[in-house]
Amino acid sequence: MSHTAIDVFAKVRGHEREAQLRAARDADLLPYFRTLDGPARPVVRMEGAERIMLGSNNYLGLTEDARVLQGARDALEQYGTGLTGSRLLNGTIPLHTQLEEEIADWMGTEDAIVFTTGHQANVGTLGTLLAPGDTVVADSGDHASILDGCLLSKAKLRPFRHNRLDKLERTLEKAAGDGGGVLVVVDGVFSMEGDIAQVPAICDLCERFGARLMVDEAHGAGVLGPTGAGTAELFGVADRVDLRMGTFSKSLASCGGFIAGSREVVDYLRVSSRAFLFTAAAVPAAVGAALAALRVLRSPDGPPLLAAVLDNARYLRDGLQERGFAVVQPQPLGDGRDVVTPIVPVLVGDDWKAVLLWKALYDAGVFVNTALHPAVPPGGALLRTSVMASHDRATLDRALDAFSSVKAAFEAEHGPLPTSFHG
């Protein structure tokens, strides 16, 4: 009997992005995998030139803080370069338990668990707590790691349109008939759009339908709230959120992730989450840096850093809007206040226009991130800018001047850019 062999690698040839990727590389227009030649500062050395960094998640600017560097050095000297085992076996050190205790105290929860990466925190939590027969209700703008965890769990996935509470309500009505447990998962701050979830109203809906709620605070922790504990703290509803996820790779100047919640849930994850049990513990320097960064945030130096990054975000957003760019609007908090998060996206629309505009800015000495379909909806290509507490106004003004000059030249050749933002 003969068989026709099918090459499992065939899919890597002729895929939908292959021609675009080749053309972008040939024209030196690829906005990804650019190489940094130094630390993540407000102005970086990148591929042989100085460029204003408006594409980092180093929101508090702590990656070069002397206390954070010392925390990493001390951990390196005491515990070596790696732990060579999982947390379950030989990979737990006192820094892990201190970090978990201090995260729980910061979040106001009974317990917390630290994962090696933020992606594993979401995948390892959702893939463990959810099961076939359960339903997970997710915002369409949620992090990819949330979707990965939902798919791993084999629970029924019911997405709802981004930040539309009316759609969430209808989805919860449908989920109520599915017969299993229901978990709602939303980002606190959405990573592409920079807008925030209306957590109080989501809490109301979850309580009405008997659903549990998890908020991914990857871009909210270390940014929003009086102590920087995230969107739930900002709205004053932390005690109504069942689980809160966060990362160390943004404001906390390291790498890793955590889940904060009830002791019984965290204990269950410790002995059941495969992403936690079967991966090596983070390198000691990363744990030491995260713990030191958290302590800086919770010290008297923390509130000024939180204020500075939000002030810089508003300054950049307002400056871009004044120069005719389509940017996200300030987010209302429901009490007469509003907030601009450190993520300030600029709507371009067309993928190729976004890449060309990115390259013009890059050549002008400004690095931003580019979000193309399928990371955003078709026709919704963005330039994602982000600020740090350590940006000074002179640097931001130089960046805004570059945006102005690039815009004039770009529109003369390629036509007008959008003038209003729609997420």
Image (spheres, grey):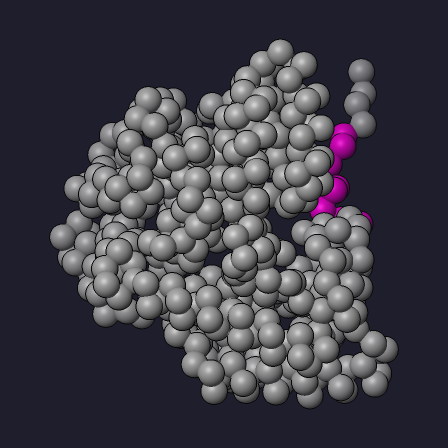
| Quarter of the figure with the C terminus | bottom right
The quarter in which the N terminus is drawn is top right
Q: Is residue 12 magenta?
A: yes
- Left or right: residue 233 versus residue 400 is left
332 in relation to 415, above or below: above
In-image side of 14 versus 65 (left or right): right
- Frontmost residue, 85 versus 94: 94
Residue projecting furthest to the left: 78
Q: Residue at x 30, y 26 (%)?
A: 263
Query: Relative to 177, does residue 90 appear above or below in the rendering?
Result: below
Q: Nearer the viewer, residue 163 or 371?
A: 163
Instruction: Inspect this view and state whether residue 135 appears.
Output: yes
Q: Magenta stretch: residue 60 in it?
A: no
Picture coordinates of residue 321, whole percent (x, y)? 67, 74
Where in the figure is residue 75, as x and y percent of width and height?
19, 54
Query: Considering only vertical position in the picture, is 340 above or below 151?
Result: below
Q: Which residues are magenta?
A: 5-14
- Outermost residue, front side: 336
Q: Name the spot of residue 164 as percent of width and height, x first.
A: 68, 41
Q: Residue at x 68, y 22 (%)?
A: 173
Quarter of the figure with residue 151: top right
Residue 115, x across and y down, in percent: 36, 40
Seen at 79% across and 23% down, the residue is 3
Residue farthest to the top? 179
User: Which residue sits at x=54%, y=63%?
Assistant: 340
Give the left or right position of residue 133, taking residue 10 as reference. Answer: left
Is residue 221 in sight in this rendering?
Answer: no
